[in-house]
Image (cartoon, rainbow, N blue to C red):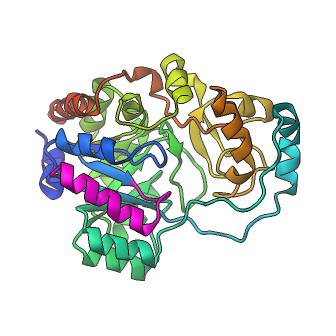
Amino acid sequence: MGAAVRAFLAMTGARLPIVQAPMANFAGTELAIAAIGAGGVGSLPCAVLDADAVVAQASTVRAAASGPLNLNFFCHRMGPPPDETVWRAALAPFYTEEGVAPPTGAPPLRRPFDAMMADAVDIVRPEIVSFHFGLPDEDLLDRVKATGALVFGCATNVAEARYLVERGCDAVIAQGFEAGGHAGHFLMGHRPVGLIALVPQIVDAVHVPVIAAGGIADARGVRAATALGAAAVQVGTAYLRTPEARPSAVQRREMEAATADDSAFTNLFSGGLARGLRNRLMDAIGPVSDAAPPFPYSSAALAPLRSHAEREGRGDYSPLWAGQGVALGQAEPAAALTDRLGNAALIGSLA
């Protein structure tokens, strides 16, 4: 195997250079257990959990699998609740057509990493803690490092990668334009770069292992990423086709028929730019709208529409997160996927 892959395996304790992507609301303990058991890095998405749930889920994983566990957190900044008048006006025709009322009250929102989550990290002491949307404040980051956990950060360009390494990250996740879910940009806005261009530039710019993420769903993509210098690959959309993942029934159905051009960036479902499959709402008002409140607030007004449509087997108002490699995936157990792609990475790193 290549030197970069060898360094990643030695650093993390994984047997295969595969990181199962966290995928908030779509991944959980079963997927992490399967990925770890097969020799990869298993991840728990903690942005939609409270601190007690983080500890409980980590304990479940620890009891079932031995290997590197990654706890993933968001580092967005929470602004004051926005005025939703324009957004609700844009959704008014859909409320009327679906026969549902706009929501009342404030639903739970994705929260950024804070002191309570730092307490949870101290209890769990995972092998890895990864961050999306930059890094937490220095005092919180120092608390994470003090547990002995490796720190991984997500970069969408070279400047972000350098920023992460300067602040002590042990590895950089290079997130290409093709990746499903939320784009992790945090310095210069959304300036997307494709993975083939991004990986070698970040590899040349930093001295830590680089993990390629975005559009990788089969052995060819894995081999290409490692041949470009990636030390490992992070896989998300391909894991959504496994029985251990948690997409809705309608999303599973849509992924089976989807092609690369069905995947588009949208801000409608959370307020942040994220890549998912086109659906009725995106086609009706456009995938990106100035009416949508900023992340993470826009999801609240959509909640009753989403629930109503999903009960009828429709994903018209749901975030169907998926990357441009969606058509390359196949239905198979997560352990088999981890083993297949992991061994492809070992071969690719020799190219």
State whether the magenta stretch is mostly helix, strand or loop. helix
187 sits left or right of 67 in the view: right
Residue drawn 76% across the image and 35% down it: 286
In reply to whether residue 56 is colored magenta, the answer given is yes
- Quadrant for the N terminus in the image: top left
Residue drawn 47% across the image and 51% down it: 156
In this view of the protein, which residue sits in the foreground, 118 or 180? Answer: 118
58 sits left or right of 300 in the view: left
In reply to whether residue 233 is colored magenta, the answer given is no
Residue 37's spot in the image, x, y percent? 18, 42
22 sits left or right of 280 in the view: left
**Does 241 appear above or below 170?**
above
Residue 183's spot in the image, x, y percent? 53, 48
Residue 205's spot in the image, x, y percent? 34, 56
Q: Which residues are magenta?
A: 45-67
Residue drawn 21% across the image and 27% down it: 340
